[in-house]
Image: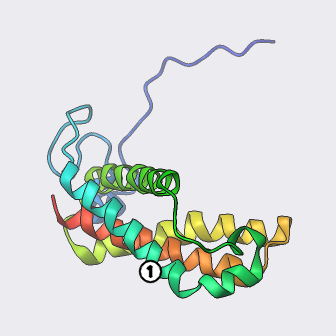
Amino acid sequence: MAHASSTRPVDTSCRNSSFADEFPSLQRSTLPTGRVEGSVMELNFLAVVVAAVAAFILSGVWYGVFGSQLALLHPAYADSGSLSAKDVIVELARNLVLALVLAWLVDQIGVDDWALAALIGFMLWIGIAVVLLVGSVYHEKVPVKLASIHAGDWLLKLVVIAIIVGVWQ
């Protein structure tokens, strides 16, 4: 038996008025900046590029510090030579995508303060990076030390990118 789809509009108002009063930015009718949904997103693309490059540099420093430990933990890191041009392009592209996504998120939330931006980066780290890395340790038997090194890199990236794109608007 096929189910008829409902054409009734979804109620987007908050049912708990104290919640709505405390978090008006979560109401769907208007974004925190006062822009109506569907309006053009305002991103600072220079901030996105700077954040991506900063994350790339910080990752390089992070993995430089832990390079010898990485080489002991996984054969992929045994040849710890310098990055090839292809590696640089791939890593910069990955960081650029991450910075764009975080820029969109902080724009939608209305972040304009470094502490809130850092908190968002931290919460994303817990909710995404840590969850994925714990899964790799549990299911794929990735060494805890290796996952911890990667987790530290993700924490740096997410927090730094969120702060840069959240504050520099």
Q: Is residue 154 left or right of residue 109?
A: right
Q: Is residue 25 above or below residue 140?
A: above
For the C terminus, the image quarter is: bottom left
Q: Which residue type does callout 1 highlight?
A: Val
Q: Is residue 26 left or right of residue 86?
A: left
Q: Is residue 37 above or below residue 151?
A: above
The picture places residue 26, in percent across and down from the top left corner, at: 33, 53
The structure residue drawn at horizontal position 28% and vertical position 70%, both measured from the top left corner, is 163
Of residues 104 and 98, the one nearer the viewer is 98
The structure residue drawn at horizontal position 82% and vertical position 71%, both measured from the top left corner, is 138
Callout 1: SS: helix
Q: How is the image coloured?
A: rainbow
The structure residue drawn at horizontal position 45% and vertical position 51%, both measured from the top left corner, is 89
The picture places residue 20, in percent across and down from the top left corner, at: 31, 57
The structure residue drawn at horizontal position 70% and vertical position 80%, both measured from the top left corner, is 71
Residue 121 in view (yes/no) = no
Residue 157 in view (yes/no) = yes
The picture places residue 10, in percent across and down from the top left corner, at: 45, 31
Label 1 neighbourhood size at 10 Å, few (<14), some (14-19), many (20+)?
Answer: few
Of residues 71 and 118, the one nearer the viewer is 71
The picture places residue 85, in percent across and down from the top left corner, at: 47, 54
Q: Is residue 69 left or right of residue 142?
A: left
Q: Count of labels shown? A: 1
Query: Residue 5 lies in what quarter of the image?
Result: top right
Q: Is residue 69 above or below residue 49?
A: below
Q: Is residue 26 left or right of residue 34?
A: right
For the N terminus, the image quarter is: top right
Query: Residue 78 lies in what quarter of the image?
Result: bottom right
Of residues 62 and 144, the one nearer the viewer is 62
Q: Label 1, on which residue?
A: 61
Of residues 67 and 107, the one nearer the viewer is 67
Q: Is residue 134 above or below residue 109?
A: below
